[in-house]
Image (spheres, grey):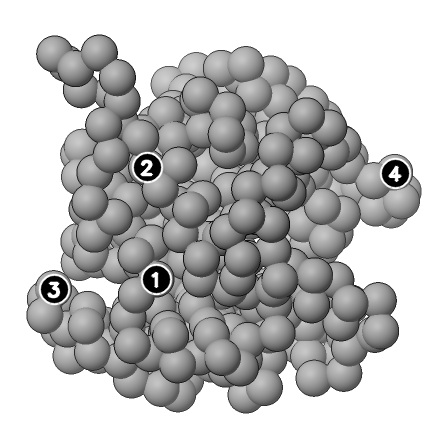
């Protein structure tokens, strides 16, 4: 994969931070004292509409394309960043492309980052589930896809699994799950992860494990302080959770990414059967099964679909096609179609229809 000198230098510095704990600690403290800007860039395109609301004290951005498509979908997208880094422009540019090419609105929550007290799996995944639920119960938006990159992929899969585990009535409305270079086993101690880390120009194990441990704090009744669960707990590491009820899932990973080990292990579970024993096995190579598509790209680095490269553009088109294939019709439009079929008329979007449910 062709890279620029600037990108190579950035990856080298990030690798050094993640491989050496004391450097990582200083870096995280600097980010905490001097937080980065999380606002969307202003050059996403004249056809892109950006709206912001606050929900549960989080900023929540909605990225959509004008004019509103007749069959709009809505994705909840969780950005990556090792649980410590803020969202960057590449995430917003992907959201704009999804809005433009897949005809979906994209909701991007700005969730709290380590070491803030509310930056935990328990609180963040709970709030993400609330975003899904609140949209349906209030009729304001209809999340029908969840996606994320890197640790955002962790949060995306955990959110989907929690909706299923708690028997949310809205879990069945999620028609697609998109995971780009996700972290799926927060232990980061599997032999395949360790082997791939040596050839990964971007990620390192030590710092990322530290971030996962900080994110893995839970409040338990009867305990004054938060407790730390085993990182193998499926509420922290989605690889060890139930995958039988997941919606159609697209998984992308590159062979120069140490997290490709996690992708291969998840692929093995889908290929060999949904058992925890299979979570320790791994199978390399792309595969497409019913309800599961894994794209393993040779010589690609971590989250390469976000990059402005030919390989990144090709991966993004795979994502767009997957979303277009699995985009459902929203409830308010389903009702309109039923009425149209009963009267024998065709539905054409009008200004009032375009508004759909209450907009943010």
- Neighbour tally class for label 2: few under 14, some 14-19, many 20 plus, Cα within 10 Å: many
Position of 131 compared to 231: left or right? right
Mark nearer the N terminus (4 vs 2): 4
In the figure, residue 272 lies in which quadrant? bottom left
Could you say which is closer to the camera, residue 7 or residue 289? 7
Mark nearer the N terminus (1 vs 4): 4
Q: Residue at label 3?
A: 276
Quadrant assignment for the C terminus: top right
- Neighbour tally class for label 1: few under 14, some 14-19, many 20 plus, Cα within 10 Å: many
User: What is the secondary structure assignment of the residue under circle 2?
Assistant: loop
User: What is the secondary structure assignment of the residue under circle 1?
Assistant: loop
Position of 271 compared to 73: left or right? left
Give the alpha-carbon distance from disc 2 to disc 1, as whole Å: 14 Å
Q: Residue at x 18, y 20 (%)?
A: 220
In the figure, residue 66 lies in which quadrant? top right
Quadrant assignment for the N terminus: bottom right
Cβ atoms at labels 2 and 1 below 8 Å apart: no
Mark nearer the N terminus (2 vs 1): 1
Mark nearer the N terminus (1 vs 3): 1
User: What is the secondary structure assignment of the residue under circle 3?
Assistant: helix
Which callout, 4 or 3, points to the residue nearer the camera?
3
Q: Residue at label 2?
A: 216
Mark nearer the N terminus (3 vs 2): 2
Name the spot of residue 337 as percent of width and height, x first. Answer: 46, 40
Give the alpha-carbon distance from disc 4 to disc 3, as whole Å: 45 Å
Name the spot of residue 119 as percent of width and height, x first. Answer: 45, 29
Q: Which mark identifies residue 188?
A: 1
Q: Residue at label 4?
A: 42
């Amino acid at each position: 994969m062709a890279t620029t000198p600037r990108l190579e230098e950035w990856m080298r510095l990030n690798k050094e931070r993640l491989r050496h704990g004391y450097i990582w600690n200083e870096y995280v403290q600097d980010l905490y004292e001097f937080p980065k800007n999380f606002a969307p860039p202003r050059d996403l395109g004249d056809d892109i509409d950006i709206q912001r609301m606050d929900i549960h004290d989080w900023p929540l951005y909605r990225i959509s394309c004008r004019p509103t498509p007749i069959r709009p979908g809505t994705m909840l997208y969780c950005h990556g960043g090792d649980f410590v880094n803020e969202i960057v422009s590449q995430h917003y540019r992907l959201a704009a492309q999804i809005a433009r090419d897949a005809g979906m609105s994209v909701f991007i929550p700005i969730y709290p980052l380590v070491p803030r007290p509310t930056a935990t799996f328990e609180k963040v995944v709970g709030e993400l589930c609330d975003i899904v639920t609140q949209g349906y119960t209030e009729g304001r938006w209809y999340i029908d896809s969840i996606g994320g990159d890197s640790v955002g992929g962790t949060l995306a899969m955990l959110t989907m699994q929690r909706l299923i585990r708690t028997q949310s009535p809205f879990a069945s409305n999620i028609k697609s799950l998109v995971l780009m270079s996700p972290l799926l086993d927060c232990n980061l101690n599997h032999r395949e992860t360790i082997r791939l880390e040596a050839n990964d120009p971007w990620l390192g194990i030590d710092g990322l494990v530290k971030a996962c441990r900080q994110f893995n704090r839970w409040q338990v009744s009867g305990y004054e302080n938060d407790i730390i669960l085993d990182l193998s707990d499926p509420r922290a590491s989605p690889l060890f959770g139930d995958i039988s009820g997941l919606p159609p899932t697209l998984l992308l990973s590159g062979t120069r990414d140490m997290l490709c080990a996690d992708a291969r292990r998840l692929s093995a579970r889908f290929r060999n059967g949904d058992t925890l024993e299979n979570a320790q096995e791994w199978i390399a190579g792309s595969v497409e099964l019913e309800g599961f598509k894994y794209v393993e790209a040779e010589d690609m680095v971590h989250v390469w679909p976000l990059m402005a490269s030919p390989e990144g553009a090709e991966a993004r088109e795979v994502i767009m096609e997957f979303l277009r294939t699995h985009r459902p019709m929203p409830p308010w439009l389903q009702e309109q179609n039923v009425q149209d079929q009963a009267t024998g008329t065709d539905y054409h979007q009008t200004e009032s229809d375009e508004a759909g449910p209450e907009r943010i």
